[in-house]
Image (spheres, grey):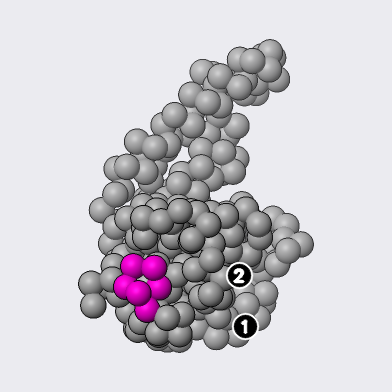
Amino acid sequence: MVSAGRPQLDLLPAADIVELLLDAEARVVPAVRAVTGPIAAGADLIAARLAAGGRLLFAGAGTSGRIAAAEAAELPGTFGLDRRRIGWQVAGGSDSTDDDEDDLAGAARDIAELAITEVDVLVAVAASGATPYTLALAAAARQVGAAVIAVVTTAGSPLADRADVTIAPSPGPEVLRGSSRLTAGTAQKIALNALTTAAMARSGRVHGDLMVDVVPANAKLRHRAAGIVAEIAGVEQAQAEDALRRCDDDARAAVLLLVAGLDADAARRRATAHRSLREALEE
């Protein structure tokens, strides 16, 4: 028998179900905003580990793992982060199922594949904070001295006990009871977006509000990169496109070529020598 006071979703018209779901999602941003401090602390921790030569790793199982993997996959293209400095593992890999959340043998294999070191940082994502697979990876990370950031939606969880920083928004009960892919999943996604974007900005991979290190891997992104160069350098789009070609699609170098009057080789050297474009421009 369904608990009193719970919505009878199977008896409702679709429009009413959607309204209930959207009402629940409206709780998410305030819940994530309430943990701004831990998100900021996690971002600074990631930036520090990357500056020390470490890698940014992600792990999770089920919905949480897939959200973590999606976040990790976006970072190299958006922020130009070397793919060798990003890693992620989802329980069961690309064919993951709910069964894989308890697969400690699979966890051991994935730990070996990640080869976590003391300078790395692991972002461990689990709505419950108690998933055996994710706990195993977090424990392995702590054992070698790596930093651990837990992203959970359950306060006081076992994963929080293994973390240097715990990000634990509490968006409230799910409309579809127990389905952590809904409000919990949205909270994890927003928290991860904020965490990684702040970390990349703190790492010098953002100039103002511009993705200065975006990888121009297709026509759309080449046009976007040229627009970024044009805006920073104060030139026309065509000039920016020419500078990008001369600098092998390095937007930082293209800006330096245009603003500092350097040739392409010198612009690339100066761009590489500095943490951020702003520092390179101020040299």
Q: Amino acid at mark 2?
A: Gln
Q: Is residue 59 positioned above or below 110 on the image?
A: above
Q: Amino acid at mark 1?
A: Glu
* Quarter of the figure with residue 111: bottom right
Give the residue at mark 1: 113
Extreme residue toward the right, this view = 95
Extreme residue toward the left, this view = 282
The residue positioned 31% from the left and 48% from the top of the image is 35
Decide whether residue 5 is among the magenta residues.
no
The residue positioned 62% from the left and 83% from the top of the image is 113
The residue positioned 26% from the left and 53% from the top of the image is 37
- Are discs 2 and 1 less than 8 Å apart at CB? yes
Front residue of 96/244: it is 244
Q: Look at the image and give the residue range highlighted in magenta.
A: 257-262
Give the residue at mark 2: 89
Q: Is residue 198 positioned above or below 109 on the image?
A: above
